[in-house]
């Protein structure tokens, strides 16, 4: 299995040439990135050509890269309890100072789909990734015509991320309610949601109302005690005492 990885990457680059926007091998996985306009063509080749024969698409996941690579908090002190959190900024309480910039991802590359492929014949896996070109209305070609099993996966990505899959036979919400507003897995979707649902005894039906029962909150990343930076800080503190 370990020897097959370099050959797969070389075969992909040789076969698809300029259509390869990125080809990454990391953590024992191979990721091929292509543009939306050639996605279906590349997908058919990966499925049909004997050299690849990825006959199964086992997953498709939407991704929102908003804020990717940016630091949401600053390390100001370290202790056995972890790191202190910086949650103050010019925009008010609970805001963060966005100082570090994402690497390799501009603001125009926000929404993407990641398709995980499996070749039983060659015992190989491949991640096929494609970015939408428009953040306001992210549109990607549907791959249901290539791998029929992606039907519900594309509906899920549409429901949760708002990615429209052009050519999908029945693109509609699959997890949220019919009257749901927005797409809950987007990074800018409010954690408390937009509306809350309750049964109105007088109207004898379910009603949607603005959220009143939940306080607005800001998610702050947790840091485990085994974080290497805490170990480094502890070592530096011990060295100063010595």
Image (cartoon, rainbow, N blue to C red):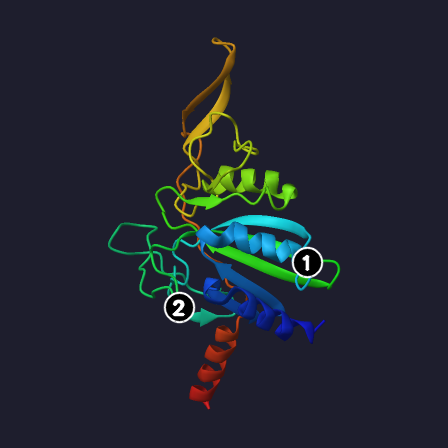
Q: Which residue is tagged 1?
A: 53
Q: Dots 1 and 2: beta carbons under 8 Å? A: no
The answer to which of 64 and 74 lies nearer the viewer is 64
The local crowd at label 2, few if under 14, some if 14 to 19, many if 20 or more residues have their Cα within 10 Å, is few
- Estimate the x, y position of residue 161 in percent, counting from the top left: 47, 43
- Estimate the x, y position of residue 143 in percent, counting from the top left: 56, 45
The local secondary structure at tag 1 comes to: loop
| Labels 1, 2: front one | 1
Q: Residue at x 56, y 34 (%)?
A: 175
Return the residue found at the far bottom.
242
What label sits on residue 18 in the rendered view? none
**Horizontal placement of 106 versus 16: left or right?**
left
- Estimate the x, y position of residue 168 in percent, counting from the top left: 53, 37
Q: Residue at x 42, y 87 (%)?
A: 240
The answer to which of 242 and 95 lies nearer the viewer is 95
The local secondary structure at tag 2 comes to: loop
**Horizontal placement of 227 versus 208: left or right?**
right
**Horizontal placement of 164 versus 53: left or right?**
left
Return the residue found at the far right.
121
**Horizontal placement of 226 versus 237: left or right?**
right
Placement of 90 over or under 238, stated as above or below:
above
The answer to which of 31 and 226 lies nearer the viewer is 31
User: In the rendered image, which quarter contains the N terminus?
Assistant: bottom right
- Estimate the x, y position of residue 229 in percent, counting from the top left: 48, 74
Mark 1 or mark 2, earlier in chain: 1
The local crowd at label 1, few if under 14, some if 14 to 19, many if 20 or more residues have their Cα within 10 Å, is many
Q: Residue at x 45, y 71 (%)?
A: 78
Quadrant location of residue 108? bottom left
Placement of 169 over or under 125, stated as above or below:
above
Q: Which residue is tagged 2?
A: 75
Alpha carbon distance from label 1 to label 2: 48 Å
């Amino acid at each position: 299995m370990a020897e097959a990885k370099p050959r797969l990457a070389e075969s992909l680059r040789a076969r698809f040439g300029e259509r390869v926007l990125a080809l990454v091998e990391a953590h024992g996985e191979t990721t091929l990135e292509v543009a939306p306009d050639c996605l279906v063509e590349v997908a058919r080749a990966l499925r049909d050509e004997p050299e690849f024969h990825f006959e199964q698409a086992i997953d498709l996941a939407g991704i929102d890269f908003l804020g990717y690579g940016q630091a949401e908090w600053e390390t100001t002190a370290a202790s056995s309890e972890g790191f202190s959190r910086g949650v103050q900024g010019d925009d008010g309480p609970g805001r963060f100072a966005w100082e570090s910039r994402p690497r390799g991802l501009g603001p125009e590359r926000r929404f993407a789909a990641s398709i995980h492929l499996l070749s039983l014949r060659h015992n190989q896996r491949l991640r096929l990734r494609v970015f939408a070109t428009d953040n306001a209305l992210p549109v990607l070609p549907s791959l249901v015509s290539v791998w029929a099993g992606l039907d519900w996966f594309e509906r899920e990505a549409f429901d949760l991320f708002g990615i429209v899959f052009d050519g999908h036979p029945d693109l509609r919400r699959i997890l949220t309610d019919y009257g749901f507003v927005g797409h809950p897995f987007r990074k800018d979707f409010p954690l408390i949601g937009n509306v809350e649902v309750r049964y109105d005894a007088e109207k004898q039906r379910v009603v949607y109302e603005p959220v009143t029962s939940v306080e607005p909150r800001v998610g702050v990343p947790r840091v485990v005690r085994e974080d290497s930076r805490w170990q480094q800080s502890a070592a530096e503190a011990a060295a100063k005492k010595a």
